[in-house]
Image: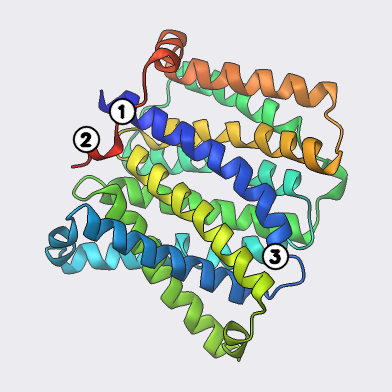
Amino acid sequence: MGHRTGFFLVLLTAIISGVSIFANSFAVQGFNPFAFTFLKNAVVAVFLFSIILLLKDFKAIKTLSRKQLCQLAVIGLIGGSIPFLLFFYALQFTTAINAGFLHKTLFLWASLFALFFLKERLDKKFIFAALLLLAGNFMFFNISSFGLPEMLILTATFLWAAENTLSKHVLKNTSGSIVAFGRMFFGSIFILAFLAFTGQTVSILVLPMQQIQWVLISSVFLLAFVFTFYSGLKHLPVHKATAVLLLAQPITVFLSFAFLGTSVSIPQAFGFLLIISGISIVFGFGFFLNAIKTKRPSIASERN
């Protein structure tokens, strides 16, 4: 039951991610991306703390050891601060589709990290599926536009992959909501330190109403993303959890088609089929079909 719950949660994360990347490509236009990132992450940290209180998980925070707190701080540094600053700065200068493609290579780097540091077994079936996923994801990318913004997004993705691997290790002894909170709380502190060091803290206080609205919208997406993903990652190997996230890319492309008039090419349609096939192979076709027919379990009922 835990494995299936993890699949549904990460599947929901993929949907949220696809919509979020599309929306955030508008949210950062004309805004200070660093102030935007800090406010969004800080709001999510407050929301997650409220959820922890609601779920009566606060005692678990008080019992965290010094080692666990240090691990959460590292998660905040390499997952909740530096990559966010890189990603949202670069998102001003590239398309949502290209950003989505590069972000979805996360499964490749995360799988390699999990192989070496968590000793997760990557069998021949997964390697074949990974080739399908990479090929499918590549169908959505405009290779002619690769430049500094794309390099920054790729760097952010590499850091997130490392953070996902560390988070999986920490999740052995704590809940997904606490890991998500640690990521956003410590991440917000590091971003605030960056703003203070670069003299940009004043930009937090002078946001017009339009920017505040975008901060709240993006915060809702990010809250849903981290809560579902880390709750799902607790029940799944890193390489499987991050592979499901590739479903977000076709969603971003569809939204660009529906609202921006961007055409969907035949290669992109073929890429979507390759991604579906790759994820089906990762989990096994029988599991994938049965999971679609099964009602999604309650998150609270699976909470440790």
CA gap, disc 2 and disc 3: 37 Å
Q: Is residue 64 left or right of residue 180?
A: left
Q: Which residue is mark 2?
A: 301
How far from the left and from the top, in percent, is residue 271?
72, 24
For residue 216, which quarter of the picture? bottom right
| Cβ–Cβ under 8 Å for marks 3 and 1 | no
How far from the left and from the top, in percent, is residue 11?
47, 31
CA gap, disc 1 and disc 2: 8 Å
Q: Which residue occupies 43% across, 63% down?
A: 44
How far from the left and from the top, in percent, is residue 212?
60, 71
| Cβ–Cβ under 8 Å for marks 1 and 2 | yes
Q: Nearer the viewer, mark 2 or mark 3?
A: 2
Q: Secondary structure at mark 3?
A: loop
Question: What amino acid type should be assigned to the residue bearing mark 3?
Answer: Val
Which residue is at the front of the view, 293 or 186? 293
Residue 187 versus residue 91 in the image, above or below: below
Q: Which mark is residue 297?
A: 1
The first of marks 3 and 1 along the sequence is: 3
CA gap, disc 3 and disc 1: 35 Å
Would residue 108 be seen by someone viewing this image from the given angle? no
Q: Which residue is mark 3?
A: 28
Q: Which residue occupies 50% across, 76% down?
A: 191
Q: Which residue occupies 43% across, 20% down?
A: 123
